Every structure is written in C-alpha cells, then in structure tokens.
Image (cartoon, helix red, strand yellow):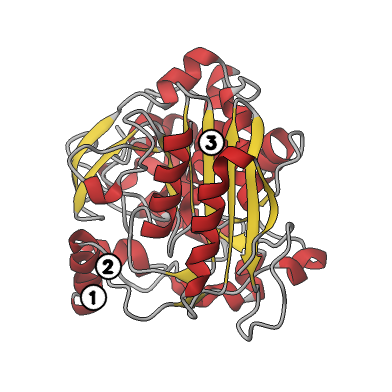
C-alpha cells in the first residue's frame, strides 16, 4: 500500500517499512511522524479509518491513543510547579485535604508521577458505571486506602494517575485539567491532540480492531493471562476497574471523555510535535525538563508485572527489558498507549517519534511495528 504524506529522501527505508506493514490484511490504518531538530522529516499515513475499509485515513484522522497522554498531564503539572502553585514533594493532601484518607497523607506529586504512590488501582466494587463522573471518581480516589507505603514499590497508575494529577491541577489553577492542557499546551502550539473530542470532530475518529495471532512478548502474555484469569489481582483492577479497552473506541461518550491520564485522540504529527515543542523549551524550562526526564523509579512494576523505569510522568528506556526498547538510544523517554500507539523523544539528538494505529497488537509496551520503524530511523539519524 502506498503511503501519503511527506518523507525526506534519506528516510525512504522508513517509508518502505511503513508501507510494508499493510501487507498484512488485518492492518487497517496507521500514521507515523518523525521530527529531527524541530523539522518534520517523516509524516506518513495509510489505510482506512473505519472498520469496513471504506473510509480513507487522512492527515487529520484522529486515533484513540489512550495513555500516550500521560506526559501531557505531567508537563501541565510541572508548569504549575514552575509557577509556584504546586510542589513535587509536598503531600497531595496539602492541596486536596480529603485525599489523606486511607493512609494517603504522605503521598506526594512526585510519588504519583513516578508511579510509586501506592495507589495504582481501585478495589472493587465495579467503578465502570461512575468513570465519566469526575466528582464521583475523585471522591472514590480520596477514600481509597493505600496498597503499600508510598515510595516503597512501583505500580503503574493506569487511571488513578489522571484523576489525581487532574484534580491537583483543578484545585491549584482553577481550570479543569483538560481545559488547562488545551489552553496552555495543545492550542497555542497547534497540536492535533484532543482530551475530549468536540462533537463536530467525531467524524475524524478512527475505529480500533484487534489483530489475531499477535500474542506479544512473554511479559505481555503473562499480564494478559493474569487479567483474564484473576479478577481481583491488582493488575486486573488497575486495567479494568474502570476499564480502558479498544472496545470503547466506538462510543461517543469515550470520544468526549476528559481524563488526562487515560484518554486522548491524536494524530501522529500532533504527538511528535508535542515532544519537539517540549525539547525546544516552549513548555517548561531546561531545568524542569531535566527533572522530568531524570530517573525517578526503577524496578519490577506490580501492575505491568515487568521491569519499568520512570521519570516524572514518562516511561524511560529500560535496559533490563529489550522487548520494550525504543530502539533509539538509552536516553529516550515518552509513553505507550493500549494496542500500539506510542510517542517518545531523544533530547540528545533532538528527535521526536510517534506511531499511531487502529490495529491493536498483543504487546503491552512498544509494538514491534513501531520498534522496527524507530530502529530504521535511528540508523539514518
């Protein structure tokens, strides 16, 4: 399949590999964007955006990128840290007194952003019916007891991260968190990244489908087995209570959902440009960027059930897990989304990379499709 868009001649091998993805008849649509030194060298798209293969993927097609949005929430919080409205090491309960319930009085913003808060999941009962009600969910979180003492273990806050950071933004800035991100990050920089899609743009949203036969790496297989078979395991609760699933990608309530850690709809160009904007110093200072990308936690994550390494709201290259490598050097940082979307950057080479797809794979970290494209691009850079 021939891709549309632009590609600098030296990246023709990347373009060929992107087009080769569609040799698999299960592939529906995808986008790829690579910026080097603030210049777009690759911006490609191909395939269809609907489930029947009748609607072409366009430059402005929006893809449900799930947790790829987490670094946006982190940068928003860090912007408030720089303004003196938030502090990394003051307890969350200083700004949100109700949060101190359940032994959480010592949880800090740094703990939440580095996934060491001890509040990575919500226990039963089922929280799916309440997930679209912000007030109800933050009240649930405020009352939820710790799973372990903050700072003593890693546990990815699949959905809890977005509600906690979002509520801190709301309480210290006054704006809803997704409004803050829109007004301070995405809109001023022309980023096609939506935290709650407006109804007039619903027609642009691509629909997910799963691909058969893609089982993923051993860590991914183990996690899937746990989530399938053990309904009260902490990992199962983190991913399903409430649940973030490709099945939601056809629900208008999900399209409009404003949860700054778990739901976003974006183009590959919008995501890559976020990292280019970040590296250019237009969002936070160099000192704060260094803090954002400095290792904050490293070890076996109790939710992912694999070794993870985090900065302040970003995933970092983990030497102990080659299957999760960005394939662009040891200092890359960014975030994955459920099913295959990813966006990340390398500050040393001033490179930003994003791959978005609606054909859900079996890997829980970087998808082999994106990994291959990144490796080919890195060889050129």
Q: Is residue 232 visible?
A: no
Question: Which element type, helix, strand or loop, lies under badge 3?
Answer: strand
Front tag of 1 and 3: 3
Q: Is residue 253 above or below residue 311?
A: below
Earlier sequence position, callout 3 versus callout 2: 2
Graded by Cα atoms within 10 Å as few (under 14), some (14 to 19) or many (20 or more), the crowding at tag 2 reads many
Question: Dot 1 corresponds to which residue?
Answer: 231
User: Which residue does the image show at 30% across and 28% down from the upper left?
Assistant: 296
Q: Which of the 4 quarters of the picture holds residue 328?
A: top left
- For disc 2, the marked residue is 236
Which residue is depicted at the point 63% across and 86% down?
A: 52
- Looking at the rendered image, the quarter that the N terminus falls into is bottom right
- In three-dimensional space, the C-alpha distance between marks 1 and 3, rounded to whole angstroms, equals 38 Å
Describe residue 257's horizontal placement relative to residue 188 as left or right. Answer: left
How far is the residue under mark 3 from the one under mark 2? 32 Å
> Which of the numbered marks, if any, corresponds to residue 352?
3
Position of residue 262 measured from the top left corner of the image (x, y, whole percent): 49, 56
Q: Is residue 159 above or below residue 50?
A: above
């Amino acid at each position: 399949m021939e891709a549309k868009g632009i590609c600098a001649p030296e990246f023709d091998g990347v373009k060929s590999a992107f087009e080769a993805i569609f040799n698999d008849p299960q592939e529906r649509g995808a986008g790829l964007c690579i910026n080097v030194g603030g210049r777009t060298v690759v911006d490609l798209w191909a395939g269809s955006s609907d489930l029947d293969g009748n609607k072409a993927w366009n430059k402005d097609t929006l893809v449900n990128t799930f947790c790829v949005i987490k670094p946006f929430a982190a940068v928003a919080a860090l912007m408030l840290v720089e303004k003196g409205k938030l502090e990394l090491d003051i307890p969350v309960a200083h700004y949100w007194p109700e949060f101190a319930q359940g032994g959480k009085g010592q949880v800090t913003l740094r703990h939440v952003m580095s996934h060491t808060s001890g509040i990575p999941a919500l226990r039963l009962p089922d929280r799916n019916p309440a997930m679209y009600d912000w007030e109800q969910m933050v009240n649930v979180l405020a009352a939820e007891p710790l799973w372990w003492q903050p700072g003593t273990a890693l546990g990815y806050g699949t959905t809890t991260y977005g509600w906690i950071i979002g509520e801190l933004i709301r309480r210290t800035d006054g704006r809803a968190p997704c409004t803050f991100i829109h007004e301070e990050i995405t809109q001023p920089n022309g980023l096609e990244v939506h935290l709650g899609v407006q109804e007039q743009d619903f027609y642009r949203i691509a629909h997910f489908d799963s691909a058969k036969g893609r089982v993923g790496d051993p860590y991914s297989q183990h996690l899937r087995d746990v989530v399938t078979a053990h309904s009260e395991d902490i990992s199962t609760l983190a991913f399903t209570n409430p649940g973030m699933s490709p099945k939601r990608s056809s629900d208008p309530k999900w399209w409009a959902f404003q949860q700054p850690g778990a739901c976003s709809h974006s183009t590959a160009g919008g995501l890559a440009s976020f990292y280019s904007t970040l590296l250019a110093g237009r969002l936070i200072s160099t000192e704060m960027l260094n803090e954002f990308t400095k290792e904050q936690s490293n070890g076996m994550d109790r939710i992912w059930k694999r070794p993870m390494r985090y900065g302040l709201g970003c995933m970092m290259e983990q030497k102990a897990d080659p299957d999760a490598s960005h394939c662009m050097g040891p200092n890359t940082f960014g975030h994955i989304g459920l099913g295959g979307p990813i966006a990340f950057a390398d500050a040393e080479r001033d490179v930003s990379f994003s791959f978005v797809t609606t054909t859900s794979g079996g890997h829980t970290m970087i998808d082999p499709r994106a990994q291959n494209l990144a490796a080919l691009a890195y060889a050129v850079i």
